[in-house]
Amino acid sequence: MTNSTSELEPLVAHSQSAPRNYANNYHHGNLRRSLIDKGLELLESRENAEISLRELAREVGVSTNAAYRHFENKDALMVALAVEGCQILMRDQLIVAEQDQNPERQFRNTGRAYVNFAIKNPALFQLMFGRFTAGNHSPELNAAADQIYKNLIEIVSSAIKLEPKDPRVIVFASQAWSLVHGLSVLILNGQFKRLTDDIDGLIDAIFKNQMSLAQKS
């Protein structure tokens, strides 16, 4: 693959997310999977992450007691959905990273994938990075969140040509995550509608500036 600079795909119109299959697997004996899939489907049409086990059971076509056999309470369901969201985000970022072997563009493209994920999944994004997950100590959720950060460290390390354990990599990765996350939140809150319609261009400028700062440090 050539290392010449290429135009990135538009942010929203060309999502890198693979199609999700929400087929009901209950009849195949996997009710837990069906409940998670239906939960993700419901979140796609909502602005906030509010789902009850009773509602979810009704949507899948099972009793509430059946749902409680797989999730002891609503928090357990929210954890499962947040973990699933982390896995989808990591998959989206892996897809764009594999499409270009240039480390700097990989860094920029994975940042765009992060913002794109937030725009397409506002309720799930809110659940993954909101107060609920910040105060939750689920080992599974912590492991999923840690993996997102580890992946970022690897991408940043390659982009700025430093070892992953170098303190500068950790600082730079933290800055990059803060930037894309803050940008995502501002976009979801409608703050950029008054400033610019060119979100793609804004993201490009942010990452070019980040790389410029990294090269000077």
Image (tube, helix red, strand yellow):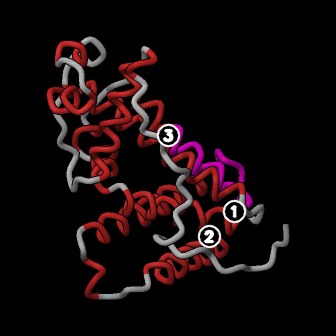
Could you tell whether 33 is left or right of 208 in the image? left
Distance (Cα) linking label 3 and label 1: 23 Å
Which numbered disc, 2 or 3, marks the residue that appears first in the sequence?
3
In this view, the residue in front, 17 or 140, is: 17
Q: Main secondary structure of the magenta part?
A: helix
Region rendered in magenta: 147-165
Which numbered disc, 3 or 1, marks the residue that appears first in the sequence?
3
Check disc 3 and report its element: helix, strand or loop.
helix
Point out the frontmost of discs 3 and 1: 3
Q: How many marks?
A: 3
Residue 88, image x, y percentages: 49, 44
Q: Are marks 1 and 2 in contact (CB under 8 Å)?
A: yes
Q: Quadrant of residue 101?
A: bottom right
Which numbered disc, 1 or 2, marks the residue that appears first in the sequence?
1
Q: Residue at x 35, y 38 (%)?
A: 82
Q: Provide the residue designation for mark 3.
A: 87
Could you tell whether 69 is left or right of 196 in the image? left
Q: Residue at x 46, y 58 (%)?
A: 177
The amino acid type, in three-letter code, at marker 3 is Gln
Q: Quadrant of residue 172?
A: bottom right
Q: Provide the residue designation for mark 1.
A: 159
Distance (Cα) linking label 1 and label 2: 9 Å
Point out the frontmost of discs 2 and 3: 3
Q: Residue at x 27, y 24 (%)?
A: 76
The amino acid type, in three-letter code, at marker 2 is Ala
Q: Provide the residue designation for mark 2.
A: 214
